[in-house]
Amino acid sequence: MKAVQVRKAHELIIQEVEKPRISNSTDVLVKVKRVGICGSDMHIYHGTNPLATLPRVVGHEVAGKL
């Protein structure tokens, strides 16, 4: 599957990553249909989020289906 990763401020890549696996009975696997980029993602991209560690996969506003 594809993921957008910020490697350092103002540098992002689209990379192929391994599909997550279900490891607990309470886990679910969601087929992602859309992902939004919010303000905190923009701060990560610009390098202005002091709590973010890099590299980091961004895009946590997710819509999908089971």
Image (spheres, rainbow, N blue to C red):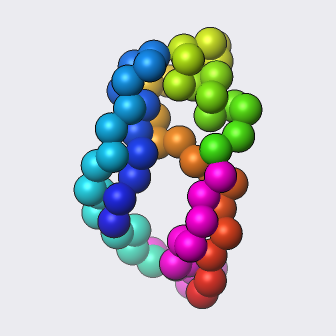
Q: Residue at x 44, y 19 (%)?
A: 10
Residue 33 percent location from the top left of the image: 56, 73
Q: Residue at x 33, y 65 (%)?
A: 1
Q: Is residue 20 left or right of residue 31?
A: left
Q: Residue at x 40, y 68 (%)?
A: 20
Residue 18 percent location from the top left of the image: 29, 63
Quarter-wise, where is residue 19 in the image? Answer: bottom left
Residue 2 percent location from the top left of the image: 35, 59
Taking the image as drawn, is residue 52 in sight?
no
Taking the image as drawn, is residue 41 in sight?
yes
Magenta residues span 23-36
Q: Is residue 60 left or right of residue 58?
A: right
Residue 38 percent location from the top left of the image: 70, 40
Up the image or down, 46 lies above or below 37; here it is above
Up the image or down, 2 lies above or below 25; here it is above
Q: Is residue 39 left or right of residue 34?
A: right
**Viewer-side residue, 55 vs 3:** 3
**Viewer-side residue, 35 vs 27:** 35
